Every structure is written in C-alpha cells, then in structure tokens.
Image (tube, rainbow, N blue to C red):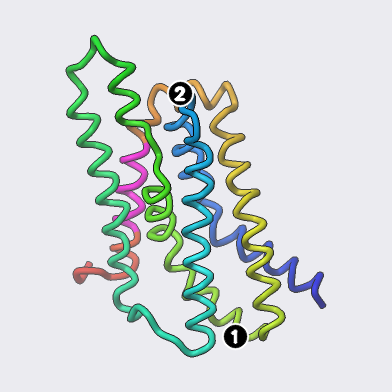
Amino acid sequence: MTAGVSAQAVGLFAVTNFDDIVILSLFFAQGAGQPGSARKVVAGQYLAFTVILAVTVAVTFGASFLPKDALPYLGLVPIGIGLWEAWKIWRHRNRRDSDKEAETGQSRPSVLKVASTTLANCGDNIGVYVPVFTNVGTSGTITYCVVFLVLVGVWCAAGRFVATRPVIARPLSRWGHILLPVVLITIGLIILIEGGAFGL
C-alpha cells in the first residue's frame, strides 16, 4: 500500500512540477560563483513547498485561506519579480566598465525571491493536491508529504545539474540574467490568463 502511494506521489509531483526545474536552473545559474547562493535557492524552494503542503493539508482537513478566485492573481508575483530583474538589467546596461559588479547586482538569488516565485508558479497545484490528499486519508497524506519533500531535494539537484553542464552553463551565464525575467513574466501572464484574472 505504501509503495503504491509513494509511486503515485512521485508521479503527481513530477507532472505538476516539471517546469520548476527550468526556473531552478536559472536561479542556480544566476548565483553561480557566489558563496551561499545555492543554499539560498534550496532553502527558498523548501520554504515554498512547506507552505504549499501546509496549506494543502489544512484545506484538506477543512480550513480555507484563499478563495479559489484569488489564486490566479498569484501570477502578479512572478511578474513583479521579473519586472524588478528587468529594471536592474536596464539600470546596469551602460556600466560596461564594471560588468562584474553589475552582474553581481543582477544575479543574487534570495530565499524570499525563490520561495515567492515557486509559490506563484506552483500555488495552483494546491487545487490538484487537495482532492488527492482527501482520497488517500491521513496515512496517505503523510506519505505524499514525505515523498514531495524528498523530491524537492531531487528537483534542486536536477536544477543545479542542468545549470552546471558546460553546454548549458555557458549560455546561461551569458544570457541567464536576461532569460530569467522573461521566463518569470511569461509564467505570471500564463497564470493570470489561464485563471481568468482581470477578466482575461
């Protein structure tokens, strides 16, 4: 029973979080060469998933935090972060004589930045997880939570692996600071549009 539930948890996590590897790889690439940046990315990812699981479990057992209609507006979070990153790129565009300093200013992933981006990108997964947790009961819910938290570490390792492959790391180190705001804004727009926010 536990093995079957664990396998289902692995499948559900992979399907609902596949795109998160791309975002993680961009954050890891942004912080390349900066002491402690990898730990911040991992901590941010775990913080986000701890919140997601806590809310999912609470909703499963009767609590309610956000109305369903409010979830699409979480798309404003990655849009805001993406615009902030884009502004920093624009601000430093003429500082060719201090590229290293500019790059450092643009590429500092923080725990809150990673966590808020992950929450916005994966927050709608709560709607998928709740009925599953409801059907598997208390022991199944515990199994799902444990498997999910283990897989967060696997996802972080995969994101870092992708970001450090030479064939990928070189273009990411050169263009990652530009690609990240584009990806974040795109994700935010998708969340807003698919959720019907602002009547879209």
Question: Label 2: how many residues lie within 10 Å, few (<14), some (14-19) or many (20+)?
Answer: few
Q: Which one is in front, 56 or 42?
A: 42
Tell me the element at label 1.
helix
Q: Verify whether residue 181 appears in magenta.
A: yes
The label on residue 75 is: none
Mark 1 or mark 2, earlier in chain: 1
**Quadrant containing the C terminus in the rendered view:** bottom left
Horizontally, residue 127 falls left or right of residue 104, namely right
The label on residue 134 is: 1
Q: Where 66 sits versus 150, above or below?
A: below
Residue at the extreme front = 36
Which stretch appears magenta? Answer: 180-190
Label 1, label 2: how far apart the Cα atoms are: 44 Å
Q: Which one is in front, 93 or 196?
A: 93
In percent of the image, x 45 and y 39: which residue is there?
27
Tell me the element at label 2.
helix
Question: Label 1: how many residues lie within 10 Å, few (<14), some (14-19) or many (20+)?
Answer: some
Give coordinates of residue 124: x percent, y percent: 43, 68
The label on residue 171 is: 2
Q: Amino acid at mark 2?
A: Pro
Q: Where 129 sits versus 172, above or below?
A: below
Give coordinates of residue 44: x percent, y percent: 47, 51
Give coordinates of residue 1: x percent, y percent: 82, 78
